[in-house]
Amino acid sequence: MKQFDRRGFLKLSGSTLIGMTLGGVALRANAQEKLSLEDPTAVALKYTHASKEEGKNCANCTYIQGEDGAEWRPCGIFPGKLVNAKGWCSAWMKKA
């Protein structure tokens, strides 16, 4: 087993602490929460988690982002929030 001197221990400890801190910040930055029906923008745009009109849903809207097939995806209309792919809002526009 390799022996560490005090300087080596402090370097390793400092690097580990910085790495863990920055890694945690990056994970939190990517975390998004599901859009609430009570969100003011959702209310204003009449967002619903389940579309009532056949063929009009978030999955085929021009503003949807993320991976096809995912149940909850980011939306350009609601930054930092995830919308249900089966949802709908009044900003819906068919994907080209």
Image (cartoon, grey):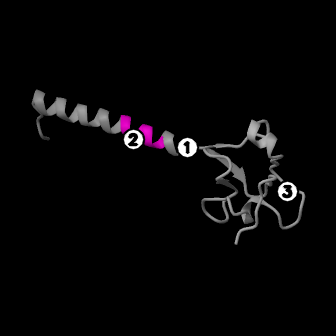
Q: Which mark is residue 31?
A: 1
Q: Main secondary structure of the magenta part?
A: helix
Residue 40: percent from the left, percent from the top? 76, 36
Residue assigned mark 3: 51
Q: Quadrant of residue 20?
A: top left
Q: Is residue 78 above or below residue 94?
A: above
- Of residue 27 and residue 29, the one placed in the foreground of this image is 29
Compare marks 2 and 3 and give the one earlier in the sequence.
2
Q: Residues within 10 Å of mark 1 (few under 14, many from 20)?
A: few
Q: CA distance from mark 2 to mark 3?
A: 38 Å
Looking at the rendering, the stretch of residues picked out in magenta corresponds to 21-27
Q: Residue at x 39, y 41 (%)?
A: 23
Residue 51: percent from the left, percent from the top? 85, 56
Q: CA distance from mark 2 to mark 1?
A: 13 Å
Q: Is residue 56 above or below residue 38?
A: below
Circle 1: residue type: Ala
Q: Quadrant of residue 62?
A: bottom right
| SS state under label 1 | loop
Q: Name the image quarter holding the C terminus.
A: bottom right
Q: Residue at x 80, y 46 (%)?
A: 45
Residue assigned mark 2: 23
Is 48 included in the stretch rendered in magenta? Answer: no
Circle 3: residue type: Ser
Q: Residue at x 65, y 65 (%)?
A: 68
- Of residue 91 and residue 6, the one placed in the foreground of this image is 91
Residue 9: percent from the left, percent from the top? 17, 31
| SS state under label 2 | helix
Residue 77: percent from the left, percent from the top? 68, 50
Q: Residues within 10 Å of mark 3 (few under 14, many from 20)?
A: some
Compare marks 3 and 1 and give the one earlier in the sequence.
1
